[in-house]
Amino acid sequence: MNFIEKLTNATRKNKTLLCVGLDPDPEQMPDKVGVFEFNKAIIDATADLVCAYKLNLAFYEALDDEGIDALKQTIRYIPNDIPVIGDAKRGDIGNTAKAYAKAIFSNLNFDGSPPNSPPLLSSSET
């Protein structure tokens, strides 16, 4: 099933357009709670209320191997009928862009990714 079909089905099933961001910031998380456990609690509480989940890779990459492991666990934990969006806005060209696409879609198994903003502009300026 492609991204649009998955999104349409989840939107109809849960009767919502809500997309929940899973962007773990350890400074804003409860003490002694791991990233995956934090995400798992959010997913358990919202899986029937969302049409998608969006994970911002910067938060996971900043936590090094532990963050990437939590990212992979989180992706696997999200119900298969809910689209998972990998927020990895990385503007580049040619084979570098292809490598990012492979990492996002083939290796990490995201269903979608937001488009990049125009070069030299921050997201708030677009």
Image: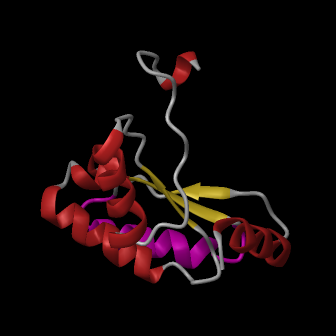
Tell me where residue 67 appears, x and y as whole percent.
23, 62
Mark count? 0
Task: Please state which of residues 6 and 106 is positioned toward the viewer in this rendering.
Answer: 106
14 displayed left or right of 2: right
Residue at 23% across / 71% down in the picture?
69
Name which residue lies at 45% across and 82% down: 77
Q: Quadrant of the N terminus?
A: bottom right
For the record, the magenta segment spans: 30-50
x and y percentages locating residue 34 in the rendered image: 26, 68
Q: Viewer-proximal residue, 101 or 23?
A: 101
Is 101 one of the magenta-colored residues?
A: no
Q: Quadrant of residue 39?
A: bottom left
> Residue 94: x percent and y percent?
34, 41
33 drawn magenta: yes
Rendering coords of residue 5 (x, y %): 74, 72
Examine the rendered structure and indicate whether residue 111 appears above or below residue 114. Answer: below
Task: Work out whether residue 37 can be spotted.
Answer: no
> Which is more toward the observer, 125 or 37?
125
Q: Quadrant of residue 19?
A: bottom right
Residue at 43 percent across and 72 percent down: it is 109
Q: Is the image coloured rainbow, by chain, by secondary structure, or in one colour?
A: secondary structure
On screen, residue 48 above or below 124:
below
Q: Residue furthest left?
A: 65
Q: Residue at x 59, y 20 (%)?
A: 126
Q: Nearer the viewer, residue 2 or 39?
A: 2
- The answer to whether residue 24 is left or right of residue 113 is left
